[in-house]
Amino acid sequence: AYGMFEAPPYNRVQALNFEPMASLYAEAGACLDRFEAGETTAAEAQDAIIGLIEQSGLGPAPWHLTDRSKRYPTTFTLPNLIEYMQWGRTASPPSVRNTYFGGGKGDASAWFQWVSTMLLDELQRQGQAASARSVDYLRESLQPLPWRGGHTP
């Protein structure tokens, strides 16, 4: 099953072999080259790259990549992954939807289901650990402390 992730368009970080994304990276790279050469300002380069993302439609709406006030795309929590999955299935460009959200070589929904299951398991474990810590804290707070002249149980 994991073999498909070794072949294009899935085999690179950030979908570098996915043609629409590869084109976006190349164009954004050209904007950075112009900035480094002193041909544009940082603000102009930022505007150009944000414009490319907006034009391409490849920036997942829940990540707010075109919002200049955001300095990071998102946190990868279950609610955010659900929003991302919703965007992918309904609002993403057809090239993204067909390749990653059903109809392509690999349906990302299986991956998201696996991630969701893992996250729910982790939430359950964390909840149980927090409950145990609360019980320990309560037990320790009710016991007399030796330095107060009390006895140790």
Image: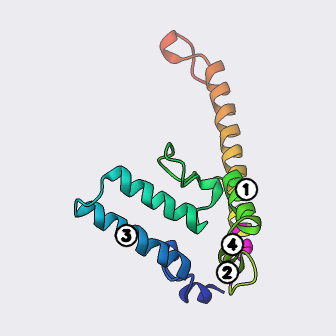
* Amino acid bearing label 3: Gly
* Count of residue discs: 4
Residue 76 shown left or right of residue 46 in the figure: right
Element at label 3: helix
Closer to the eye: label 2 or 3: 3
Percent from the top left, x then y, of residue 111? 69, 72
Q: Which mark is residue 29?
A: 3
Q: Earlier in the sequence, mark 4 or mark 3?
A: 3
- For disc 1, the marked residue is 120
- For disc 2, the marked residue is 99
**Residue at figure coordinates x 71%, y 80% from the top left:** 98
Question: How far apart are the alpha carbons under marks 4 and 1?
Answer: 14 Å
* Amino acid bearing label 4: Trp
**Residue at figure coordinates x 69%, y 54% from the top left:** 78
**Residue at figure coordinates x 61%, y 85% from the top left:** 2
Name the image quarter holding residue 117.
bottom right
Magenta stretch encompasses residue 127: no
**Residue at figure coordinates x 67%, y 32% from the top left:** 134
- For disc 4, the marked residue is 111
Magenta stretch secondary structure, dominant:
helix
